[in-house]
Image: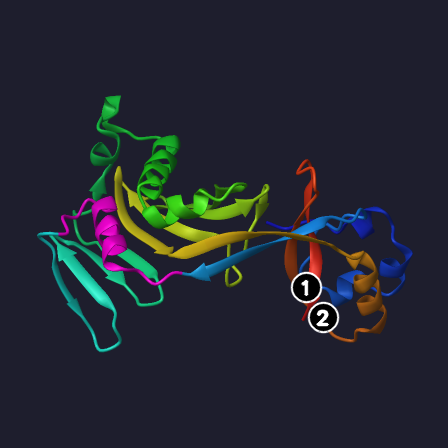
């Protein structure tokens, strides 16, 4: 998702004169009003035994019956009737089903549609139901203001690929440059692949007034010779009725 730069819509003389489009690779909304900033922190979570058990159960795999082994790097593999799960020490999870295996929508919903055809909403719904059974996702969504949104959808004629990301106060969060925190590959009413990373989320109670970052951008545009990209801070007004992104760091 891309955002228009407010200064362009306002015909900002600094940005016009010094060539904003020639010096900036990514754009965002800038609010003129100052916001009180709450620090939102995200950290990868290392999976423990209880979490691994809940992950396998969410993927309809019996933790008591799966075969498993670990490699020399500490990556754990679990196998069960054509389905396997790979879990890294950093909290990256990959579910893959081979051949005719997978998670049928009947197991997710408990029903089968008339005419043997699932529509797009069924695919999105099945993904959300599975995501809701994952403890790591539920724990993140317990943070007030954090929610899932559909960040990516693709269809190549046979496989539907869905991605879901976090948004805070309506603003998408990027982790490692991408929005997706969980993604699915689905075909013929069956989930074939699930990828996700485990995150812990916390919001500080402290607030601090922010400066007018538009002046920071103007200064950069005037002096820069190369294009730059931005790191964003996610800012919210004290009454929580407004939210926006302001530039925190130039790189």
Label 1 CA crowd tier, 10 Å (few <14, some 14–19, many 20+)? few
User: Magenta stretch: residue 34 in it?
Assistant: no
**Residue 4 rendering spot, x and y as whole percentages:** 72, 49
Q: Which mark is residue 67?
A: none
CB atoms of marks 2 and 1 within 8 Å: yes
Q: Tell me if residue 207 can be seen.
A: yes
Q: Nearer the viewer, residue 155 or 227?
A: 227
Rendered residue at 78%/58% (across/down): 213
Rendered residue at 13%/48% (across/down): 62
Task: Tell me which corner region of the image, top left, top right, bottom left or bottom right, holds residue 232.
Answer: bottom right
Q: Which residue is mark 1?
A: 25
Farthest-out residue, top: 114
- Horizontally, residue 159 falls left or right of residue 144, namely left
> Mark 1 falls on what kind of element?
loop
User: Magenta stretch: residue 53 in it?
Assistant: yes
Sooner in the amino-acid sequence: mark 2 or mark 1:
1
Residue 109 lies, with reference to residue 54, above or below; the image says above
Farthest-out residue, bottom: 72
């Amino acid at each position: 998702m891309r955002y228009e730069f407010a200064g362009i819509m306002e015909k900002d003389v600094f940005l016009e004169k010094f060539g904003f489009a020639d010096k900036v690779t990514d754009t965002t909304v800038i609010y003129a009003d100052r916001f009180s900033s709450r620090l939102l922190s995200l950290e990868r979570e290392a999976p423990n035994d209880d979490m691994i058990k809940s992950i396998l159960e969410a993927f309809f795999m019996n933790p008591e019956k799966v075969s498993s082994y670990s490699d020399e790097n500490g990556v754990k593999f679990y196998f069960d009737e054509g389905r396997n799960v790979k879990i890294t020490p950093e909290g990256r999870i990959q579910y893959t089903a081979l051949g005719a295996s997978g998670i049928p929508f009947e197991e997710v919903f408990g029903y089968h549609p008339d005419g043997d055809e699932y529509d797009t909403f069924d695919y999105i719904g099945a993904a959300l139901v599975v995501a809701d059974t994952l403890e790591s996702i539920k724990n993140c969504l317990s943070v007030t203001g954090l929610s899932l949104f559909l960040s990516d959808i693709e269809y190549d004629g046979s496989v539907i690929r869905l991605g879901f990301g976090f948004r805070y106060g309506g603003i998408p969060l990027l982790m490692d440059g991408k929005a997706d925190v969980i993604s699915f590959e689905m075909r013929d009413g069956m989930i074939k692949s699930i990828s996700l990373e485990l995150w812990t989320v916390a919001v500080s109670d402290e607030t601090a007034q922010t400066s007018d970052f538009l002046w920071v951008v103007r200064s950069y545009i005037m002096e820069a010779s190369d294009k730059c990209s931005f790191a964003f801070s996610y800012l919210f007004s004290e009454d929580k009725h407004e939210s926006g992104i302001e530039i925190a760091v130039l790189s």
